[in-house]
Image (tube, rainbow, N blue to C red):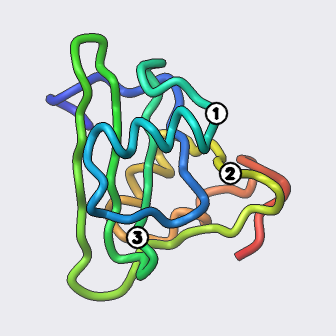
Amino acid sequence: MPGLIETPAQIWIAVAPVDMRRGLDGLSSVVQHSLDQAPCSGSAFIFRNRAGNRLRLLLWDGNGVWLCQRRLHRGSFVWLRVVNDKTFVITQLQWEWLVAGVDWQRLSATCQPDWQV
């Protein structure tokens, strides 16, 4: 996200869909209690709705929390079903492809060995 905030140390994707009505506090609670992560760790956390056409990004930049949303008017974001995990990490390049609505899985299969498409 050039120009706005620095690239986060890690970018985590939440596997299960969430209610997009959740705001900062609701998503921070999901990160802390459901994903067992610290919302203010400097990592980015990406959530999607059940339909797969909306993303929400929660990110602590050291001064405050960012909550950003992206919606596709056609199609859906490419999402993985991960066996036995609530989250997985993606690279900066995969993140850029994901938010563009492109099949970012074509970049590499080195993130997690337990992926199922």
**Residue denoted by label 3:** 49
Residue 66: horizontal and vertical position, in percent? 23, 33
Q: Is residue 25 left or right of residue 92?
A: left
**Residue denoted by label 2:** 86
Inter-mark Cα distance, 2 to 3: 15 Å
Q: Residue at x 38, y 65 (%)?
A: 19
Q: Is residue 44 left or right of residue 73?
A: right
Q: Amino acid at mark 2?
A: Lys
Res 36 label: 1
In contact (CB < 8 Å): disc 1 and disc 3: no
Vertical position of residue 2 compared to residue 79: above or below: above
Q: Quadrant of the N terminus?
A: top left
Residue 54: horizontal and vertical position, in percent? 32, 69
In contact (CB < 8 Å): disc 2 and disc 1: yes
Inter-mark Cα distance, 2 to 1: 9 Å
Mark 1 lies on a secondary structure that is loop
The residue nearer to you, when weighing 63 against 6, is 63
Label 1: how many Cα within 10 Å (few below 14, some 14–19, many 20+): few
Mark 3 lies on a secondary structure that is loop
